[in-house]
Amino acid sequence: MFKINIIPYTLKFKNPAGTSRGVYKEHKVWYILFINTENPTHFGIGECAPLQDLSCDYNDDYEKNLTSFCKLTEENQIIDVDILKNYPSILFGMETAMRHYTQTSWQLWESPFSKGEEGITINGLIWMGNYSEMLERIEVAINKGFRCIKMKIGAIGFNNELELLRYIRKQYTKEELEIRVDANGAFSTEEAIDKLNLLADLGIHSIEQPIKARQSVEMSFLCKTSPIPIALDEELIGINNYDDKRNLLEEIKPQYIILKPSLHGGISGCQEWISIAEEMDILWWVTSALESNIGLNSIAQWCATLKNNLPQGLGTGSLYTNNISLPLNIKGYQLWFNPNGSFPDLSSFLKNE
């Protein structure tokens, strides 16, 4: 039998993380610990990391809801996925904690990645900032050896962002460097196609969420007419029933979907998205959503079992000054896990009852 402890924790960003929705300086998360009632050294940890302005399950009652679901899970000694499907960040934390608890190891899934034999190819993430800051971040990412970069746009003016992208293309062809852009819904529907045409001249691989979510007719039109493949991200948030997922993809017909377990239904919900997308020949990749290394480790190890050759979005583990230390390291353009590395002493968490 296990009991569950809930540990609130505030992650501190090394540098403010800018998005088109605002700037993050800290991120409150909740760690949940499944602890064996007879052997407290047998435990599993998961991370519930909602994004305040984005997650469908975040509200003023979040911690109250988390507590209720943890009590229910304690009573039943099993995770009720159906009850939790509309609470993706909580479901993901539960799934991770249970996986760690049952595996009794930080190697949550068996794969060449979890054995330290292979890395996962990832994109280099270029956070928003002023022009000079973004230029510096681009140069750092390229110098580190990334073959794919993802640049967030929508904050410093489209012409400035085009200039940055042209700077990259003057140095590297699209065969040498893949560029993804993430608009976070920053384009108006009226201007979107014109901006997409300008981006197409720069050999952009794909654009995430060019217009705001819940404009299915307009998004469907863009997916049909855009010269750049479109990836859905925010569009998937809050769509947690299987039939609703299928209906959305059938209506919009995107070229890609981007899957974040904390936002898109936990690991089980993301598996549903993948199965539907593959039936419809829609490509996909997996991305973390500002989790600490606890969540990132779970996402990466699950992702490694999926054998997806596209660059994944798993490079956010180094964002925080007070991250939980795990042997996850970026080498060149890949994320690696070292099973023989140093793992955290969670005794202080285990004592917080």
Image (tube, rainbow, N blue to C red):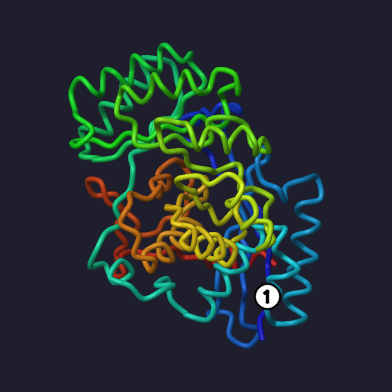
Toward the viewer: 39 or 292? 292
Q: Is 3 located above or below residue 147 in the figure?
A: below
Residue 222, position as x, y percentages in the image: 53, 32
Toward the viewer: 238 or 138? 238
Q: Is residue 159 toward the left or the right of residue 166 in the image?
A: right
Q: Is 262 located above or below residue 144 in the figure?
A: below
Q: Is residue 91 toward the left or the right of residue 199 in the image?
A: right
Toward the viewer: 15 or 271? 271
Residue that mark 1 sits on:
79
Toward the viewer: 7 or 167? 167
Residue 244, position as x, y percentages in the image: 68, 56
- Local packing at callout 1 (Cα closer than 10 Å; few below 14, some 14-19, many 20+) is some
Residue at the (20%, 39%) spot, across then down: 145
Q: What residue type is disc 1 on? A: Ile
Q: Is 254 located above or below residue 127 in the figure?
A: below
Tally the numbered discs. 1
Residue 1, position as x, y percentages in the image: 66, 86
Residue 85, position as x, y percentages in the image: 69, 63
Element carrying mark 1: loop
Residue 166 in which image quadrant: top left
Residue at the (46%, 25%) spot, across then down: 153
Residue 207 in which image quadrant: top left
Q: Quadrant of the C terminus?
A: bottom right
